[in-house]
Amino acid sequence: MDHTATHQILAVDIQERFLPHITQYSEVVNNTEKLLTAAELLSLEILLFEQYPQGLGRTDERLIGFHIRRFEKTSFSALNDPLSKAAISLNPTTIKVVVGLEAHVCVYQTVQDLLRLKQPVIVVADAIASRNIQHKAWAIDQLRNDGAIIMSLEAVLFDILKDAKHPHFKAISKLIR
């Protein structure tokens, strides 16, 4: 990764109606909450997308208290909606850090569209999920094959910090312990 790069967080469709259907839902919400907390400490932009909230409900309430820009969409990829696409930085030095649901549909299509636009993308593997765990695994395999970087939340956060001397190292370290 480019050490001068900046990061933008894209949280895709982490909506409460998925809770009864996705066994890894709590892990996704917990890890996303940690990521958003770190993003705020580091002054990173957070974009939150909601897939058809009239039918699927709103974003999980644990993720709402952050300084976010929220976008409703009906297309699976966040880049198919003009307002969403306009909010996503297409600067190739801005690394897009993607989390959300479902890994094989909306996360997958959003990441694929970013890769087609030659954008650097990190998918946080322990902050994405699908109803079927195998669908998540296949999505990760394909996204890695197509050029996305797949990392754990802890690896992403330490990659952003670069050094234990970073002013927010202790606070972020505490988040993931």
Image: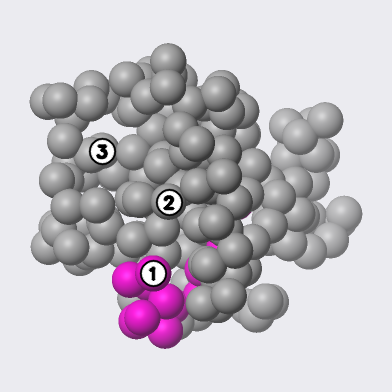
Q: Position of residue 95 (x, y in %)?
A: 51, 69
**Relative to the observer, which residue lies in front, 51 or 105?**
105
Q: Position of residue 46 (x, y in %)?
A: 41, 48
Labelled disc at residue 90: none
The residue beneath circle 2 is 104
- Foreground mark, 3 or 2, reads 2
Q: Tell me which numbered mark, 1 or 3, is placed earlier along the sequence.
A: 3
- Foreground mark, 2 or 1, reads 2
**What's the residue at 52%, 67% (across, down)?**
143
Q: Amino acid at mark 3?
A: Glu
The alpha-carbon separation of the residues under discs 1 and 3 comes to 18 Å
Are discs 2 and 1 less than 8 Å apart at CB?
Answer: no
Q: Is residue 5 left or right of residue 57?
A: right
Quadrant containing the C terminus in the rendered view: top right
Relative to 19, residue 123 above or below: below
**Relative to the observer, which residue lies in front, 9 or 149?**
149
Q: Position of residue 111 (x, y in %)?
A: 41, 64
Q: Amino acid at mark 1?
A: Gln
